[in-house]
Structure formats: structure tokens, C-alpha cells
Image (cartoon, rainbow, N blue to C red):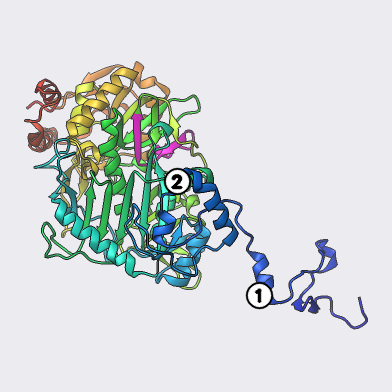
Amino acid sequence: MAKGAQPDAPVVIGGVKVVPHHEAYGDIHPPVRAKNVLELQSLQVAPSKDHLLPSQSISSSLEHVPHGQREEEVAKREEYGSRVSAQPAKRVITDSELKATHVLYNLHPSELYMEAIKYAKASYITSTGALATLSGAKTGRSPKDKRVVREDLTSADLWWGEGSPNIEMDEETFLINRERAVDYLNSLNKVFVNDQFLNWDPKNRIKVRIITARPYHSLFMYNMCIRPTPEELRDFGEPDFTIYNAGKFPCNRFTNYMTSSTTINIHLKRREMVILGTQYAGEMKKGLFGLMNYLMPKRGILSLHSGCNVSKDGKVSLFFGLSGTGKTTLSADPNRFLIGDDEHCWSDDGVSNIEGGCYAKCIDLSREKEPEIWDAIRFGTVLENVVFDERTRVVDFTDKSVTENTRAAYPIEHIANAKIPCVGPHPNNVILLTCDAFGVFPPVSRLTLAQTMYHFMSGYTALVAGTEEGVKEPKATFSACFGAAFIMWHPAKYASMLAEKMQQHGATAWLVNTGWVAGSYGTGYRMRLSHTRKIIDAIHDGSLLQAKYRSTDVFNLAVPDHVHGVPDEVLIPQNMWPDKGLYRTTLRKVANLFKDNFRKFEDYMVGGDKKLTEEILSAGPVL
């Protein structure tokens, strides 16, 4: 060292001022070969090793390239190497029918972060590396604004009428909305396009294309759909289904079938979905689930709104349940591998996850309660509508300022015990979860096949209603197949397929109540999570199959006499109620709610006659 020089004094190397590390650290390297700061910064970003199609115009980048031309075209694109074409390409007619607008095609999360931070408002990187963003005025789904085109090819298959989520529209109105969405996307200087897959079962994989205006939407779908390899992307071809998400632009509310400035339209024959007037990302996820709920049963495959995990020795369990029943918590078992948290298929080969990621609720999230979800919120995760500290960017998961429906969307690889690929053998257990705030259902009961179909079609839970000066009344909720908003066929079709597959593969169904014990809400108490976990453990280890059972009144449920780790008296609801008369009154009240709900299913014929319908009805409550 020269006399008088400071150990960390900057020196000029190649025209750039560099502060050398102290020799004691042992990390001396040759001088940087950059001539200036810009060149130095250019060295920081290395070319991607994965091949992705470069961004050009919507038309040219999405054009179906004949197989014989593909290698030559790819070579040209690699030679130019830019992601966004400097000049718009010539207009060509493609499957998307979009004009020469720049496309950002299948961007990596790092690139989508850059797009969001540089160009999108309300996009921030949180302290854990997740991308926090806002979904705009809509912070949840808009089921009353969803429309399905009634056309000749699929109309006879779909469930219409009372109780159905399928509100019809005609093709002309769909085309008006589609043109409005395409015109809006054409008006932008760039859009984001994802080509991805649904269903981890390679035999029944569906190719989807998602066209969006926001980088957050592109990242969301990157996480939620299955991500193709470079080779799969090169041979992707034409998609089986396309989403046009122009959610930043409203629909014309004076158009036929429209009731607001928001609309979500599905056209099964055209294999397209249009979104206008809502930026809530969950509409894309659930729109694709609706598609799978139509396509898979036509192939003899049962699509399910459920969680799914598997033991180390290959024993699979399905978890069904509405919001607040504990589906996410109970299916995330550290002693088992997670196949998926929300959407699955049951084929002749076993179960498979439809998605490539998870869309978890974040409100009141803590490391202690849900460590798997907590640890998954890192770089690549989308945090939707959360509130964070302005300076530290630490998220406050208890803050409901924007909405209670705060969400995290992340790749399933972010879950430490995820099973990749997300497939498994045939299920051993089918667990129907309910949170009965009336307190009349036992903590666990074993179901017959007919009872399974009845309770599956009912999709019951009862949650506590809003606070009103003192008394809070439980509110019964019924959602057919535990996902009525997303089904396409009549619920009896899904129920009969479930019973058939259970019978064929020897699966057992269980009704597990995570709700109230010793009275309704206000007098009783919530079933302890530790007790519910013991029940789930007993289902998984097979001990409940060997238990002795007794039958309950009205619902005729088979209840075990003993579950290891759970007090015996808790297993029989009436034993815990101090007022037996009030218990019987409440039980009959709930039974009547079930009967009222099921009336809309009574006249439906399965397989051309009412035999199965009558069998299902006979498994309901008897007063």
C-alpha cells in the first residue's frame, strides 16, 4: 500500500471509481472490465438461459407458426434478442384478433416486478420481497355479474334456473363485450400475454392464454397456472381457451343482460372469456375453474373444489369446505405432502391439482397459526390489497382498511412440503368440513354413499352474522358441491360421479364439524382446533374405521364412541347442551333449513330417471 493511502480509498479502474475490499476478507478479484457506469450496470443483468419468445406485436408473437418454420423463426428472434420490438409488426389475422400492439410474452417474475414498479401505480415491494398491489374498486368476485352464453353446443349440458350460478346471455351481447375488450387492449401501447397450462395430469392438460393490461395480473396468473418449460412453450401452438382481461375498462351497462359496469362473460363454444369493469384477479382463476368444471366431467373426470394432501405412504385425503371451515388450515399438515389447496381433478389414474399455485387468505395471518403460508410470502408472491408500513414495508395482516379479503398468490413451490408434480393416487378419505354455528352437528360422523351425495350437494356451513347490539344470530349458508359459484353441470352430476369413484376405489366419507359445541354461538364454544386435528389424525391412521358407532336423531349420522385425544362427551352434541329442549328445537330448525334448500334439486333426473335423486333425498334429515 502506498504511503499515506487509506485502506478503502476509491481508485479508478477502467474509467470507473471502485472501492476495493480489504485484503483480509480474501475476496480480491481481477479489475472490472467496464469502461463506464452504464457498462458496469449492463454486466449486472445476464441474458436468460431459458428461451422465451421475444415481445413483438400481439399479432406476430401470437401467430401460429407452422412447425417447419419454427426453428428458423426462433433463431431469428434469438439473434435480435430484444423483448419489445422497436417497430410495430405488420397486422396479421391471428387467433387473438388483436392488432399490432406490443406484447410482453410470458415474462419472468423479475421482469413483471420491473414493469409493475416502473409503470403501474400502487405497486410496491414489501419487506419479504412480495409484490403488493391493489385490485381497484372491486376487492372480491362479482358473481351477480357473471354471464354464460347460451348456445346450441353446450346449452343442454349446463345447469340453468333456480340455484344455478349460470346466468345466461346471448352470443350477440358477448361479441359486443368481446369487441369492447379487444378495442381497449388495442388502445394500449403494450399488453401482457401468458401461455400456460391447467391440470398436472399430462393426459388431460388444458392450454390457456391470458391477455391482460396489468403486470400484476400477469404475475398472478404466472403463479396460479402451471408454468410451461421452454420446450413446452416452443411447441405450445393454439390455446384451448383464451381470457381477454380488460378489467380496467367498464362494460356498457345499457347493453342487454348487463346490470352494472362490471361483467365476466364465458363462451364455451368459442372457448373464450371476457372481463370488463373489474380488476380483481380472482375472476380469472375462478373463470378457468368454471371451464374445468365443464370440460372434465365430459371426459369422465370429476372436478372438485377441494384441498388435497397425501401421506408418505401414499394415502390421499380430499378436504371440502366453505370459507371459515378450516379447509386451508387442516389440509396444510406438516406430516403430509400438499398436492393442492383449492382445485383438483379425480380421473381413472388418481388425483391431480388443476393449478400451479395457491391463493390464500391473508387476513390475521401469523407465523404461529399458518407457518406454511407465512413462509410462502416472499419474492414472486402477489399480495393483493394488503396494508404495509410506508417506511419499512412490513405488512400488517390485521389491517382491514382496504378489505377483509386480502390475498396472497404464490407458486406451489413456495410451500416446503408440496408434492411436485402435484398428482397422487386415488383418495382414501373424503372429508366434508362444516362450521356449524348452531351447534347441532357432531364433531365427526361417518357417511354412507347416499349421505355423502346429500351433504356434498347441500354444501352446508353456518357462520356468525354481522354484529348488531348484543345478539349475533348464526346464518346458514348452502353452496352446492362446496363451490356452487363455479359449477356448470347440475350438482347431482358431480355428486353421482363422486359416489361412483368412491365406491370404485374404496374411499370413505366423513362429515367433520369445526363449529360450535355445547350450544349455538353465544352460549356454546368453538370446537378446539387441537381436538379437530386429533379427529383428522384418527381418520388418517385408520383408527376411526375400527371404532364403534351410534346413530343420531333426525340426520341419522354415524358417530364414533371414542376418538383418541378427544373427550367422549364432546362427540355427542346433545350431551353437551345444558338445555336439551333447546337442542331439539335447534336441531329441527337446522333440518328444515336443509329441506328448504334441497327442494330445488328434487325434480332433477340423473341418468334419465329419478331413482338416484330419490336415493339422495332419502339420506336427508327425517322429522
Residue topped by disc 1: 38
* Residue 449 image position (x, y, % from top left): 23, 22
Observer-nearest of 481 and 66: 66
User: Is residue 185 positioned above or below 454 on the image?
Assistant: below
Q: Locate residue 94 relative to residue 391 in the image: left or right.
A: left
Quarter of the image where one finds residue 215: bottom left
Quarter of the image where one finds residue 432: top left
User: Is residue 17 positioned above or below 263 on the image?
Assistant: below
Q: Is residue 224 visible to the viewer in this orientation of the structure? A: yes
Q: Residue, x 92% and y 79% (percent of image)?
A: 2
Kind of residue sitting beneath label 1: Leu
Q: What secondary structure is found at the residue carrying circle 2?
A: loop
Density class for disc 1 (Cα within 10 Å; few <14, some 14-19, many ≥20) is: few
**481 falls in the magenta region:** no
Q: Locate residue 519 relative to residue 565 in the image: left or right.
A: left
Residue topped by disc 2: 66
Q: Locate residue 536 relative to residue 411 in the image: left or right.
A: left
* Residue 348 image position (x, y, % from top left): 36, 24
Quarter of the image where one finds residue 550: top left
* Residue 305 image position (x, y, % from top left): 30, 39
Which residues are the magenta region? 330-346
Count of marks overlaid on the render: 2
Measure how far apart labels 1 and 2 are at the Cα level.
Answer: 40 Å
